[in-house]
Image (cartoon, helix red, strand yellow):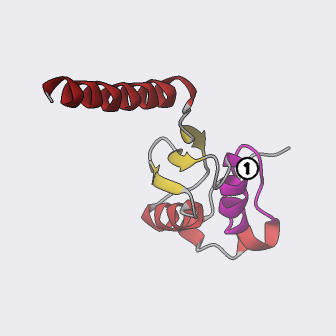
Amino acid sequence: MKSIILKNLLIILSIFLIQNINNLVFGQSSQISKTIEVSGNCKMCKKQIEKAGKTKGVSDINWDIKSHLLTISYDSLKTSIDKIQLRIAAVGYDTPLFKANEETYNKLHTCCQYPRKKE
């Protein structure tokens, strides 16, 4: 009786161990963190930038007013850094990949109109 219980316990533990090793070796995380520069000036900019970037798959987003750096944590299976930057540019803020169009930029509050880089 004891040997049957021990044998079953050993089988269960072996299965559990193999499954966990498999997850460690082959299970790559799809969670990514990136930091990019986003133009802006004030707390109102911060609110708009973070709201635009917070989309499905984004778990954390924070724009620093002084450094103009946006730190984003997101699930790469649900969104991409390109999609996030496009959403931010769509509300008037320039990113490394996308420049906000002139009309959208001009609609920003005057305190949010940052000096734009010439291309």
Residue in the picture at 47% in, 66% down = 47
Q: Which residues are magenta?
A: 81-101
The quarter holding residue 119 reads top right
Q: Is residue 61 left or right of residue 88?
A: left
Using the image, determine if residue 109 lies above or below residue 17: below
Q: Nearer the viewer, residue 72 or 18?
A: 18
Q: Position of residue 115 (x, y in %)?
A: 66, 53
The amino acid type, in three-letter code, at marker 1 is Asp
Residue in the picture at 67% in, 69% down = 91
Q: Position of residue 85 (x, y in %)?
A: 68, 53
Q: Position of residue 35 (x, y in %)?
A: 55, 38
Q: Nearer the viewer, residue 43 or 51?
A: 51
Using the image, determine if residue 36 lies above or below residue 88: above
Q: Which residue is mark 1?
A: 82
Magenta segment includes 89: yes
How crowded is the residue under tag 1: few (<14 C-alpha within 10 Å), some, or many (20+)? few
Classify the position of the N terminus by image quarter.
top left
Residue in the picture at 72% in, 52% down = 116
Using the image, determine if residue 13 lies above or below residue 38: above
